[in-house]
Amino acid sequence: MARKRRNFSAELKAQVVLDVISGKKSLAEASREYEIKDSVLARCKQEFLSNATRAFEQTQAVQEKEARIAELERMVGKLTMKVELQEKVLSLDNTRSLNDE
């Protein structure tokens, strides 16, 4: 009977690799504890290290979206100020017209 292939979650892989990298456990210890082959664990470690810089990179699309959000927030602020000013002018006009009556 063929053995079923096990799938490990990204969180588990990251935790195991961090344990190995930080020195909490050796590769062999982690392999035994989590019942993961040494070769699989070594591959996970290599993949983790090769992708580590991505955690600190921002894609161009993200930067453009953040710039657009900042621009829209500025526009909302300006429009809010205009509305508040118009409301004050209208309330003054209403007060004056009531006083004129």
Image (cartoon, rainbow, N blue to C red):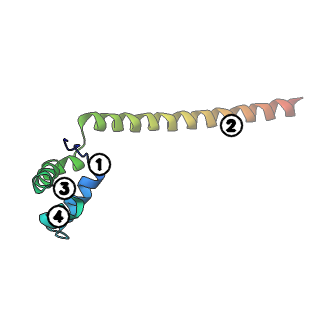
Q: Secondary structure at mark 1?
A: loop
**Among the two numbered marks 1 and 4 on one chain, the one whose residue lies closer to the N terminus:** 1
- Point 21% across, 61% down: residue: 18
- What label does residue 101 carry, if any? none
The Cα–Cα distance between marks 4 and 3, rounded to whole angstroms, is 13 Å
Comparing 32 with 15, the one in front is: 32
- Mark 4: amino acid: Val
Q: Which of pointers 2 and 4 indicates the residue nearer the eye?
A: 4
Is 33 situated left or right of 28 in this image? right
The Cα–Cα distance between marks 2 and 4, rounded to whole angstroms, is 65 Å
> Where, quadrant-wise, is the C terminus in this rendering?
top right
> Where, quadrant-wise, is the N terminus in this rendering?
top left
Q: Secondary structure at mark 4?
A: helix
- Mark 2: amino acid: Lys
Residue 7 pos. (x, y %): 25, 45
**Residue that numbered label 3 is attached to:** 36
Answer yes or no: do the residues labelled 1 and 4 have beta carbons within 8 Å? Answer: no
Comparing 24 with 67, the one in front is: 24
**Residue that numbered label 2 is attached to:** 88
Answer yes or no: do the residues labelled 2 and 4 have beta carbons within 8 Å? Answer: no
Quarter assignment of residue 68: top left
> In the displayed image of the protein, which residue is found farthest to the right?
101
The Cα–Cα distance between marks 1 and 2, rounded to whole angstroms, is 58 Å
**Among the two numbered marks 3 and 1 on one chain, the one whose residue lies closer to the N terminus:** 1
- What label does residue 9 carry, if any? 1
Residue 35 pos. (x, y %): 21, 58
**Among the two numbered marks 4 and 3 on one chain, the one whose residue lies closer to the N terminus:** 4
- What label does residue 20 carry, if any? 4
The Cα–Cα distance between marks 1 and 4, rounded to whole angstroms, is 17 Å
The Cα–Cα distance between marks 3 and 2, rounded to whole angstroms, is 70 Å
